[in-house]
Image (cartoon, helix red, strand yellow):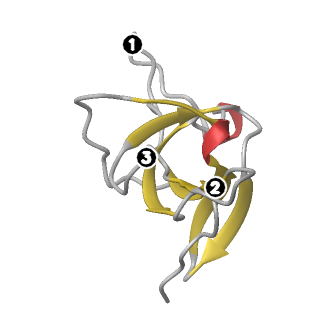
Amino acid sequence: MKFRPLHDRVVIRRIEGEEKTKGGIIIPDTAQEKPQEGEVIAVGPGARDEAGKLIPIDLKAGDRVLFGKWSGTEVKIDGEELLIMKESDVMGVLEGAKASRKAA
């Protein structure tokens, strides 16, 4: 299934955090926090201003981004857990970082 977000919304796949500390201690799943980093999967066309002019989104598919801990709405599409959030909920893009394929 192909999903296209509307307006200024983006679809993000969480990128898993480290399962070990720097000292080599393995962190159990129950103690791990949900990652606040993800890969943009799809973006909407953008929001409209008061005059009806389209304001395009600065993000593009493949960008690696940081977002707030409680941002977005979790959805399951084709068995994959994804987040849908407004562009304004994204705090920034990690430049020069390639998103890994490890999904949450």
Residue tagged 3: 59
- Label 2 Cα crowd, 10 Å radius (few <14 / some 14-19 / many 20+): some
Work out whether 32 lies above or below 43.
Answer: above
Label whose residue precedes the other's in the sequence (2 or 3):
2
Q: Find the distance from the CA under tag 1 to the CA under tag 2.
A: 42 Å
Q: Earlier in the sequence, mark 3 or mark 1?
A: 1
Which label number is shown at residue 47? 2
Q: Report helix, strand or loop for mark 1.
A: loop
Check disc 3: other Cα within 10 Å, few if <14, some if 14-19, many if 20+: some
Image side of residue 29 versus residue 98, left or right: right
Q: Is residue 8 visible?
A: no
Q: Quadrant of residue 83?
A: bottom right
User: In which image quadrant can residue 95 be found?
Assistant: top left
Q: Can you give x and y, in whole percent of width and height, for residue 31 in the image?
A: 69, 31
Outermost residue on the bottom side: it is 1
Expressed as whole percent of the image width and height from the top left, the position of residue 46 reads: 56, 57
Is label 3 or label 1 in front? 3
Mark linked to residue 22: 1
Q: Nearer the viewer, residue 37 or 22?
A: 37
Report the amino acid beneath label 3: Leu
| Most foreground residue, 38 or 49 | 49
Nearer-the-camera pick, 11 or 50:
50
Look at 70% across and 39% down and name the residue there: 30
Q: Is residue 27 above or below residue 29?
A: above
Single out the mark in the foreground, 1 or 2: 2
Q: Secondary structure at mark 2?
A: strand
Looking at the image, can residue 20 be seen? yes
The local crowd at label 1, few if under 14, some if 14 to 19, many if 20 or more residues have their Cα within 10 Å, is: few
Where residue 23 appears, as percent x and y from the top left, is 40, 10
Q: Residue at x 72, y 59 (%)?
A: 74
Q: Amino acid at mark 2?
A: Ala
